[in-house]
Amino acid sequence: MTSARLGFNARISFPTGGAAQALRDGIELFRVAEQLGYDTGWVYQRHFDNYLASPLVFHAAVAQHTDRIGLGTAIIGVRYEEPILLAEAAATADLLSSGRLQLGLGTGQGGFDSVFGQEPNDGREQSQTRLAAFLRAVRGEQVGVVGDLAGMVAAGTELTVRPTSPGLADRVWYGAGSVASAERVGRQGLRLLLSTILSGQIDDYGAELARAIRAYRSVHPATSPAQVAVARSVLPATSPELRRRYAAYDEERRTQGPAASRPPGALTPLARATPLAPSTPLARPTPLARPTPTSLTSSTLLAPSASRAGGVGTPVPTQLTPVSTQLTPGSSARFTMSPVHHGDPYEVVDQLLADPSVALADDLIAFLPPAFGLRENLRLLEDIATTVAPRLGWAPTTGGRTS
């Protein structure tokens, strides 16, 4: 974490019939995260399911309950968004939040072309076409000319999106799932979001992301920030009960892939995971005077590094196996889900320090398990902020905004 910014990604999931409470809990999650010093909170968009569908509306509400924390979308699937309407909504949400929106876009989940009134199309190509139109609109460029002689505005009048929000165009991120797509984002001069899923079968997840980051920065123009955020499942266990809980989540994710940790009533993905051997840390020295999990606190974990073997500046290699997943039964297309970093906070810190992509990134985003409730997520956010992130160079933010 070169600039040491910390965020989290919440799905804002809900059991069938429980959307209203989930939205209120989501606002509370952001409010407490701001108190803990998090720089940014991100939410995900998913249509026709038990997850948040309208991130910009949600963030407009969150903005009324927070003052500083950045409000991110990771991601809005631009393939099904009308570019001008999206630019209008994004500018409005950014103005209501006093310029705190971090607008993450991407291709998004497919399969709904006809529902959104589209002919079958290549989702990536469609997304790039709509992205280009959106960027023109959000930058305040001309998007059209009045041609309807029966309208209330004179024919020939040049049209631009109003309102616009100063600086928003420089806070547009785009999701990438491969080295090639990361390079494309770099050429477009956008900020880069690297998630917990990559295209293809990847053996070393961190190394592959590091290659993507280097490719992105090698072609990014100097006219806008070349910022990179990487998402990770970060689950530091500060009690034996949490250690068992997080290990069970890791096992569920390995065996079920994207179907893991779903709220009651959610749709079942077709994608399935290929069973892999559990991740096993390599042998390492036993830390000196290491506290037991029940006594782990921020004060013990932030003690001088001499209190543990090797110190925090000496990463201990850890073998973490990503999860290879088949898109649909019988399909040759695959993607890889990132490994889950779990164990006691010392182990989690070591794993993250050994990941080259974390060292190269500007932002680390902690992915919260989708089916976790508010209480579980608040505990996880506090444990990350007090027992892991400071060891990665992060300090809580108490004033100002994340740019």
Image (tube, helix red, strand yellow):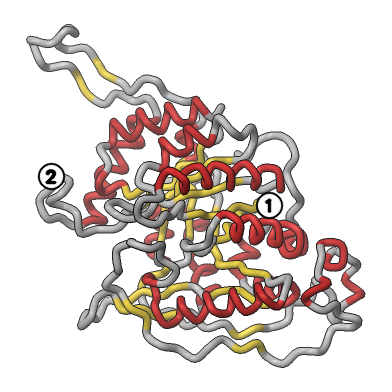
Q: Amino acid at mark 2?
A: Gly
Q: Is residue 388 above or below residue 46?
A: below
Q: Is residue 361 visible?
A: no
- Marks 1 and 2, how far apart in space? 43 Å
Label total for image: 2
Q: Residue, x 67% and y 75% (percent of image)?
A: 241
For the C terminus, the image quarter is top right
Q: Is residue 111 left or right of residue 316?
A: left
| Left or right of residue 330: residue 258 | right
Q: Position of residue 145 (x, y in %)?
A: 19, 19
Q: Mark number for residue 193?
A: none
- For the question of whether residue 366 can be seen, the reply is yes
- The residue to which callout 2 is attached is 117
- Residue 23 as seen in the image, left or right of residue 116: right
Amino acid at the residue labelled 1: Ser
Q: Secondary structure at mark 1?
A: loop
Q: Position of residue 230 (x, y in %)?
A: 54, 60
Q: Residues within 10 Å of mark 1 (few under 14, many from 20)?
A: some
Closer to the N terminus: mark 1 or mark 2? 1
Q: Position of residue 206 (x, y in %)?
A: 55, 73
Residue 3's disc is 1
State the residue in front, 63 or 283. 63
Q: Nearer the viewer, residue 217 or 271?
A: 271
Please state the horizontal and vertical placement of residue 16, each as a whole percent of the image.
Answer: 35, 55
Residue positioned 62% across, 62% down in the render: 360
Whether residue 133 sits left or right of residue 244 in the image: it is left
Vertical relation: 204 (above or below) 138: below
| Secondary element at image label 2 | loop
Residue at 27%, 76% in the rendered image = 333
Height in image: 147 above or below 137?
A: above
